[in-house]
Each structure stands twice: as C-alpha cells, then as structure tokens.
Image: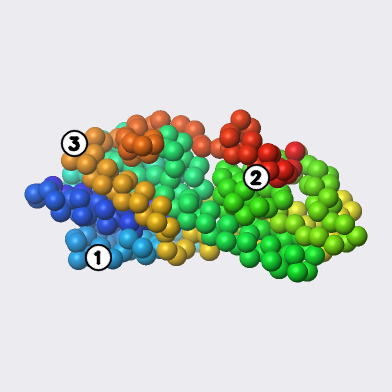
Amino acid sequence: MNRLLIATGGGDCPGLNAVIRAIVHRASQEKDWEILGSIQAFNGVLWEPTEIVVLDERKVKGIHFQGGTIIETTNKGGPFGWPVKNKDGTYSEVDRSDEMIRKLQYMGVDGVINIGGDGSQRISQKLFEKGLNIIGVPKTIDNDLSSTDSTFGFQTAVQIATESVDKLVTTAASHNRVFVMEVMGRDAGWIALNSAVAGGAEVALIPEKPYDINIVKEALEKRFYHNRGFAVVVISEGAKPKGGSASIQKNEEVGYHNQRLGGAAQRLISELKAAGFKQDMRETVLGHLQRGGVPTAYDRVLSAQFGVKAFEMALDGDYGKMVAYHHPDFTSVPLKQAIAKENLVTEDNQLVKTAKGLGICLGN
Ligand code: F6P
C-alpha cells in the first residue's frame, strides 16, 4: 500500500477542494494507493492525538465547486514554528519538524502533497531538505508565486473584484462620487490591475508602484465637470504612497507571522482630502469575500489539472518539486526555484501597457 498525505496550508482559496478531489480520483485509478488528509495543514499530524482523515471517492463527491477546504487550513504556526505557551503567558516557538517526519514514517506515509502559497512552499522545501518526499501545489489568490503562469483561486478573486467594480460604478455614477475599492494583494497588484482593466476603473494603485497623491488627484479631477462625474479607484491592500509604507493593522493572533494589512482605501481618501480634492468619496473593502465561495470554471479546471499532475508526480517519485502551469503544459519545477522570487507586476508587463493604453492612472 502506498500512502499519500494531503495538507492545505495558508489562507484558503477557491479551488482547494477541486485539487483534493482530482488527487483522490486520479489515485483511485491506480492499485494500492491510499490518500490521507491532515486537518489544518500539518497540525493534524502534530496534534496529539493526530487528526488525519482518509480521503476516498465518497468523501470528495461533489466538492469541486465548494469554496474553502474540507480538511481546513491555518496560516499560524507550523512544524518549524510550533507555538508553546510559557509560564508567564507569553509564547515561544519550537521546531517540531523532525518529530513530524518521524510521525509520518510511523504512519507509513510515503509522500506528501502540500497545497499552499509561498509560505507553505517554503515549509515544503525545508521538509524536503530534511528528507521528506514532498510535492507542492501553487495556491494563492494574489498570484504572486513565480515559476507558474498562474495559481488557482486568482481568477475567482479577479471575477469577484470585477463584479464589485461593476456594482460600484452604478452607485458612483448616481451620486457623482469617487469610490475607492480595496482588494487583496500583499506584495503583488495582480487582482487590482486585472479588475481595474476588466471593470473600467479610472485609477489602479498597486504595491509595486508607490503612488504620487497629486497625480491621483489630477486623474480624478479630470472625471468631474461642474461637480458632476464619478470615478472608481481600485487599490491593493499593500499599496503605498511614494516614500511611505503599506497600511498595517495590529494583530495579536498567536503564531501569525504575516503583517496584517488593511486601511489603504481609507488612507487614500484622507490623503486626497488633504491634497485638496473636493468631491465626495466612499471606500469599500472587499477583504475575504475575494477568497470565499464557489471557484470559477477556469479555477476548477486549473485545480483539476494541478491535482492530477501532482498525483502523477508522486507516482513517478518526482519529489521536491512544485506543479507548474506553463501554457499549454503542466510541468514540475524544483521547490527551491519556485520560492526564489515573487511574481510581481513589472513596468514592462503587457497588462501595465494595456492599462496605460486605456488611460488608467497608475499613480506615478
Ligand atoms: O496571501 C493571500 C492573502 O489573501 C493576502 O492578500 C492577505 O493579506 C492575506 O491573505 C490575509 O489573510 P488572513 O486574513 O487569512 O491572514
């Protein structure tokens, strides 16, 4: 019997269940493969007692269009930074990776498929260096993983953001207002840029291009004549003014290492007011609405392709790699290469040229 364990780590993302289902379906076509799921990323293995479920065809029936992940996820802690409470109430972190690998050996697990973003794939690489047979599947709505043309979940997030721009346009036009819509995108502005182009926004502000508030103000003023007019600004949560930094929220969750972003839209409105912009403004923060719910058909197909390919990599013993989409092929790239750099919006990207061609102000 061959045993493969699936874990879903980091922020959830539409399409996770479709990947799980594809792995299970493909595995069922081979003799003697058992697929297990660890609850809440690797916590299921590390907890005492463990929380591991058997994933068979019955368990994954009809889950391809369900958002979230049936085996849950977490973006706190993990095998290399397990939080332990000290006597004084503070927390320290311990490395439990060796213990986890031993536990997996004891459970007879031959390989692991870790579905997650850059943080999760960094964990995959470290576990691989310690000798664990592991394969990565790229997941993130931010689409900031390089070495793959696209990650699943991204198209769904863009669709949700675009539909939101469409809705804001009608209320903005009715009230002669500017709407500033904040979308996810910690380091990469792909969701903002794509939804601004698709939704016909006037301004798109992304983390890669710090903005000049006077340029934004000028672009918005052009949209008004005798106080009549409207505009939509799409801003990434990680956007920042020239010389400034991203808007950070306080977060005291134990084991959470990311900076919690938020407040970029509100700050932009204050900056515009301070710069003398006179029209009415409102902000909308999309937040986790972009991560929840049903994946688009595109993301379901991409997830299915990633899942089938990941299982076939396990079948071939192709470990230490991440599944990658290089149109029209699905290949595998070393995890080390996959985490080496982020997929960021660059000045020479065709979408930047297209946005400029449409007259979208990028704030610089
Ligand atoms: O990494 C994906 C992402 O959607 C980021 O854009 C965002 O900053 C983060 O997740 C928020 O995640 P959570 O609130 O789950 O910690």
Cα–Cα span, label 2 and label 3 = 41 Å
Circle 1 — which element? loop
Neighbour class for label 3 at 10 Å: few (<14), some, many (≥20)?
few
Q: Position of residue 141 (x, y in %)?
A: 48, 51
Disc 3 marks a residue whose amino acid type is Asp
Residue 44 falls left or right of residue 256: left
Residue drawn at the location 51% of the way across and 36% of the way down: 342
Residue drawn at the location 69% of the way across and 39% of the way down: 356
Q: Position of residue 139 (x, y in %)?
A: 41, 48
Disc 1 marks a residue whose amino acid type is Lys
Kindly identify which numbered label has been placed on residue 206.
2
Say whether disc 1 or disc 3 marks the residue closer to the N-terminus. 1
Label 1 vs label 3, nearer the camera: 1
Residue 216 or residue 101, whichever sits in front: 216
Residue 159 or residue 308, whichever sits in front: 159
Q: Which residue is mark 1?
A: 61
Neighbour class for label 2 at 10 Å: few (<14), some, many (≥20)?
many
